[in-house]
Structures are given as structure tokens and as C-alpha cells.
Amino acid sequence: MATLLLLEHEGGAIAAASARALTAAVALGAGVDVLVAGSDTAALVAAASRLPGVGRVLDVQEAALEHAPAEALAMLIVSLAPGHEALVAAATALGKTVMPMVAALLDVMQVSEVTRVLAADTFEHPIYAGNAIETVQSTDTVRVLTVRPAAFSAPSGEGPPAPVEVVALPRQRGAGSEFISAEVTRSARPDLSAARVVVSGGRALRSAENFAKYIEPLADKLGAAIGASRAAVDAGYAPNDLQVGQTGKAVAPELYIAVGISGAIQHLAGMKDAKVIVAINSDPEAPIFSIADYGLVGDLYEVLPELTALL
Ligand code: FAD
């Protein structure tokens, strides 16, 4: 029995987070069926069929799924559960909404934010805001997993085209929610969850104008994604989808630059797996320095323009 992976797509392209989740799905060792749902999916299905490790593409052409209403997707995944021993999605906003519904409908336990696959039924994932790593063995007949994208690399290359099977959407009861509109942030910057370099700003930026004025030029020079602490997001300096941390995104870039961020445990939960951490903070006692590989004690309003000019 294979693993079923929910393949998210954005603007006609496979989401980077789902590509990374495919690596985890392949590691389960049972072969992977990927589920592509939406309207006008032909190009996506063709791309999905060539992803290395994909054994079959399940194509659900259904306009009603275009905006991925969670309830409808959950019921679709449940209808495909027979014949699959694991149901997997990336731990994105969508995956984190759909998969708990799937687990509840199947009456099984979800394993959330898997960071390592040890065996088909045994996984590692962080608990207590990333302060402990738990190893879990699932005894459920169908395993429902969300996968932390930052913990896996995207598969490289192409495989031979996998067969495509067109699947009909099962008749559904009223889904309980309907699509009204979407406000999508479009950015030329790399996706925060998958970026190689992240520059993050904290409360010390003091305003949205300063955030843009000081953080963006450095990020531009480094080709980096922009992140923010929750304090910066709550104060309106940066949009919500840039929040890094326990209640934001988990990132594991090669380089993470934290500017004017104190290093609260909830922020560290989202970025401590970065390979190199640079902290810029005026307080030499700031907790961020305890996990930083390089620390710069100074006023960001002086240090950042100088640093940016040097690059
Ligand atoms: P502060 O803690 O206020 O730190 C600002 C830093 O800027 C200080 O270290 C200061 O020395 C420095 N500074 C000030 N002026 C300058 C200057 N001119 N130049 C250089 N440095 C300067 N937080 C998150 O980030 N992500 C989360 O996902 C998250 N989830 C949470 C979940 C829960 C349940 C709770 C309770 C909290 C959560 N938080 C989260 C909030 C977290 O506890 C902190 O409040 C938050 O991370 C602080 O943000 P900050 O570091 O920007 O601000």
C-alpha cells in the first residue's frame, strides 16, 4: 500500500513545501501517489508525474477545489484512504488545516511536523516549542502525517513519467465553508520556508517604514527572504505571513540574520535549525547571542546601512 501526498500548488506551480514533503513521503518506503486537485491541472499533473519517487498521480479536476476548501479536501483524502498506509501533507497553513480533519474523520492520531522518518511507522518531531525531539511510533493502520518542509530538501532531477489516474470527487455533504476571496501576497523574494538566506527584523525596527527601509536593502543584496518576530508582526511592522517561530513559520536556511530580535524561546523554535545564525542587537546580554554563531553588538540603525553598503 502506497503513501498519499497532498500536492499543493500556487499560481500553477508545485509548492516548494510540497516538493520537500515528497522527500519525506518517499522515505516511508511504500511508493508515493500524489494528489493534485483543482481546475486546469494539466500542466501541474505533467510536472508532478516527473517528480522523482512519484509512482502515480491522482488527478482530481474539480473547479470546486480550486481554492482548496479544507473540508472538501479532507473528505476527498478520506475517500482515497483505502489503499494507502500513510496520508501526508506539508505542514503549511493548508496542510495544518486539512490533515487534522482527515485524522479526525478516520479516527486516528495525527503525527504533526515530522522532521525525520526513521521507519515507515516511526518518526521524529519537535515538541515543547522545539525544546525536545520526540520519537513516535504510530500503531494506527493509516498514518496521518504533516511534514515540516524546512527539515527536508527538495528532490532533485526528474524521474520517468508516472501514470496518471483521473479521480472523481466523491459526492459530499455541505462542506461547512465556502470560498469568498483570497488576498495573496505576491513577492519576487524567495519563499520564506525554503529560502537559503533569511533576514528577520524585530520590535527594534519601531515602524513598518523602518522595517522596509533597513531590512529590505540587506535582503535585496543577499537575495534573501524576509522574516519577522511576532512582536514586529503584532505591531504591524511586517505582514503576518513573515512571522518566524512557534506560531509562525519554521525555517532552516543556510544563513539567518536576526536584527533587533531578543531571541525569545518562541522565536528560536522557528529558526534555531539555521546552519549559521548572525545576531545584530544593541544589548550584549540579549538571549539571541547564546545561539548565534556570529554576534554584532550595536545599534541596527548604524550597523545595518554600513553592512548593506559593504555587500
Ligand atoms: P523584543 O523581545 O522586544 O526584543 C527587541 C530586541 O531589540 C531587544 O533584544 C533589544 O535589545 C533589541 N534592540 C532594541 N533597539 C535596538 C537597536 N536600535 N539596534 C539593535 N537592537 C535593538 N515570537 C516570535 O518571534 N515568533 C513566534 O512564533 C512566537 N510565538 C509565540 C507564541 C506564544 C504562545 C507566546 C506566548 C509568544 C510567542 N512569541 C513569538 C512572542 C515571543 O515571546 C517574544 O515576545 C517575541 O519574539 C519578541 O520579539 P522581538 O525579539 O522582536 O522583541
Image (tube, helix red, strand yellow):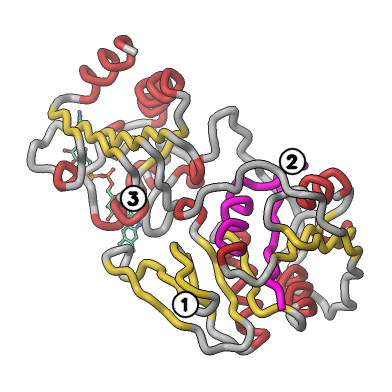
Q: Which residues are magenta?
A: 1-25
Relative to 299, is 160 above or below?
Answer: below
Query: Contact, CB < 8 Å: mark 1 with mark 2?
Result: no
Q: Is residue 8 magenta?
A: yes
Seen at 13% across and 43% down, the residue is: 286
Question: What residue occupies the far front of the structure in this picture?
Answer: 160
Q: State which mark lies toward you, 1 or 3.
A: 1
115 relative to 60 in the view: left or right: left
User: x%, y% of residue 253?
Assistant: 40, 41
For the residues marked 1 and 3, what is the alpha-carbon distance in whole angstroms? Answer: 21 Å
Q: In terms of image quadrants, where is residue 38? A: bottom right
| Residue density around tag 1, few if under 14, some if 14–19, many if 20 or more, within 10 Å | some
- Identity, as a three-letter code, of the amino acid under mark 3: Asp
- Identity, as a three-letter code, of the amino acid under mark 2: Gly
Q: Earlier in the sequence, mark 1 or mark 2?
A: 2
| Residue density around tag 3, few if under 14, some if 14–19, many if 20 or more, within 10 Å | some
Mark 2 within 8 Å of ligand 1, using the beta carbon: no
Q: State which mark lies toward you, 3 or 2.
A: 3
Label 2: which residue? 11
Q: Earlier in the sequence, mark 3 or mark 2?
A: 2
- Identity, as a three-letter code, of the amino acid under mark 1: Thr
Task: Give the number of the disc on residue 273.
Answer: 3
Q: State which mark lies toward you, 1 or 2.
A: 1
Question: What residue occupies the far left of the structure in this picture?
Answer: 285
Q: Is residue 148 magenta?
A: no
Mark 3 within 8 Å of ligand 1, using the beta carbon: no
Task: Give the number of the disc on residue 122.
Answer: 1
